Image: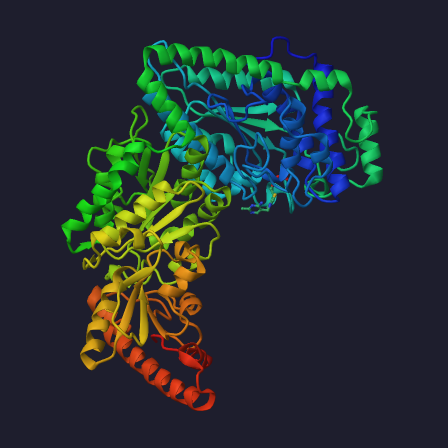
Amino acid sequence: MTHPTPPTPEFARQMANAIRMLAVDAVEKARSGHPGAPMGMADIAEVLWNRHLRHNPVNPHWPERDRFVLSNGHGSMLLYALLHLTGYNLPMSELKNFRQLHSQTPGHPEVGLTPGVETTTGPLGQGLANAVGMALAEKLLASEFNRPEHAIVDHFTYVFMGDGCLMEGISHEACSLAGTLRLSKLVALYDDNGISIDGHVEAWFTDDTPRRFEAYGWHVIPDVDGHEPAAVDAAIRAAKAQAGQLDGKPTLICCKTVIGMGSPNKAGTHDVHGAALGAAEVAATREALGWSAPPFEIPADIATAWNAVERGQTAEKVWRLRFEAYRKRYPLEAAEFERRMAGDLLPALAEQLPELLAGIAAQRAALATRKASQNALDVLAPLLPEFFGGSADLTSSNLTNFKGCVKAGRDAWGNHLSYGVREFGMAAVMNGIALHGGYLPYGGTFLTFSDYSRNAIRMAALMKLRVIHVFTHDSIGLGEDGPTHQSVEHIPSLRIIPNLDVWRPADGLETAVAWASAVARQGGPSALCLSRQNVACLTDAGMVASIRRGGYVLSDMAAAQVVIVSTGSELELAMQAQAMLAAEGLATRVVSMPCTNLFDRQTEAYREAVLPMSLPAVAIEAAQPDFWRKYVGRSGVVVGMAGFGESAPARDLYSHFGITAQRVVEAARTLAQRRKAGSAGSAGSAGSAGSAGSAGAARAETSVHETA
Ligand SMILES: Cc1ncc(C[n+]2csc(CCOP(=O)(O)OP(=O)(O)O)c2C)c(N)n1
């Protein structure tokens, strides 16, 4: 969508000034925000958005649009100004409402909230990694769906970024991968203004960025004057030319800019990075830019020049014609492309799932849940052509590959990628893939290293992305690798990320249901925490519906006195404890809780039916214990890990740390005795207080039962 007639240099400057003044005035009105980056990048933005970016403001979801990512998300007013000016449904009233409650112009861009925002940015470096994921998705889709003379997928991903994004380690992970994979339709424009929050960056950031990116295998265009539209335009053209080359590379355009360009007294200083200019400086800026329009008013000729609605509609129409020609020739592929971009699942998956799960349940094998996960993948993958799996260099440990999967590489389409040892990069790239559409990304690493990727997991949850994390080696049960690799706090700490479903399945069927639920979940990510070691088979085909509720009664006894709650590899300890207690004459109920987040979304009546307030409870999980207080109460008992693990065989570690059926038995005994004493007391004093009252009395006491 190259603009038919590029504006004159003077008019181009005025178009850029429209961005500058919208940013200045919005930040001034909000008394907070970041005017510096929008003012400094306004000229670059004019060239990219006005002359190159192929987008349709009235259909922000057009699949063939170029993607644009503002990785330096603090410069959000740059994006809001562009969206408003080019004709997205973002009226001036929203710009006036910058950073206010429920506005469409939050402090940092948020996908799903503002039309035209492709990803939520703000945590520096991640937008860049998202862009790598988008460019990867584009490349994969193109090789999967394009046919000779029918290029229905052929668009660019552009990303703006500042010094902050490049200082962040994730930029290394993502850009190194992008270079290796030769993502030649990725174009990064670096706002090289030499300023970050603490001041001039020479004291903390002296990388030779062009050489760094050359070493990654990028095409680098150094020393572009970011205030010289012709130079920026030439650089973008050169970047786009890469796409047509056999050995094309991603492009980095290094633009020298002045932060806060246009502000006579603050340009080039860190004062303009993240604070309103102040009334006097705003007036001086207006004067210096020759901008006489009042705040939030755009002169008609400039507004008209910016408006991209007609061009966008034409571009989409041209593509739709191309797509219809493709449909005529390749009707199945066209339908599949539409389904994939819509994110719908194949109807056959839902139809065949019950039978597939029954087949898995019938196997009744004692397997590590990581292996059960691979088995589930083998079964599900033929019905999920959108699967795009991977691992951060642990494929043979995470078992994220499946029968018939194809290794993705630089020159070849595939549906399983070795991301290399780049956990954070992998997680943020997966977010970019999900945002682009067309694939359902999942990736594996050891659960302990979820800390490396944590902020990208959080961003997936915030963005409501369907991304699946496969976290294996989920406890001391991994054994000899020792405490560096043994998760203790990770499961509970992941559970508290809003909108993340954390599964810790106990056996093959629970693992398969976890996969099916994660795949069907449209509004957020899931994490599957899986064992390295073998676990017993405890469920049967009749339990599928229960497992789907996240928590359920696995084994009940008449007149149960105590509930034993557990997850994952410890569920068999709970079952052993139940048998041992039964032998003593103490009846218990075992509750399996593979996904607490999902259980919490069930009705109160269901939750009460599974975990009655009237019964004392013991929880057992080889993890930090505090999380379980919300289910067992203050008077309940949690058998868990209070500190780090040790290096030893798993069996020795379980007994050393007291993660044993015996501990559960002791705890249950104590609770049952207390309950008995409590109900005798309450019956004596209150007559008909009943079991709920006695449970209340039992829960008033605290019994902490943790391992040393
Ligand atoms: C991961 C992360 N760390 C810290 C911040 C806070 N922060 C916002 S902007 C910024 C400085 C960025 O400098 P630069 O990219 O050069 O932006 P400019 O000053 O050019 O606007 C920092 C540290 C953040 N948003 N994300």
Residue farthest along the bottom direction in this orientation: 684
* Placement of the N terminus among the 4 image quadrants: top right
Res 49 → quadrant: top right
Looking at this view, is 283 or 599 the one in front? 599
Image quadrant holding the C terminus, namely bottom left
Residue 558: image x %, image y %?
A: 26, 72
| Residue 404 placement (x, y as % from top left) | 20, 33
Horizontally, residue 101 falls left or right of residue 408, namely: right
Q: Residue 623: image x %, image y %?
A: 35, 65
Q: Give the color scheme: rainbow, by chain, secondary structure or one colour.
A: rainbow
Q: Is residue 260 visible?
A: no
In the figure, residue 540 lies in which quadrant? bottom left
Above or below, 476 against 268 in this view is below
The answer to whether any part of residue 328 appears in the image is yes
Asked whether 129 or 102 is in front, the reply is: 102
Which x, y percent locates residue 515? 30, 45
Above or below, 636 against 336 in this view is: below
Q: How many marks?
A: 0
- Ligand 1 appears in which quadrant? top right
Please tell me which residue lies in front, 316 or 80. 316
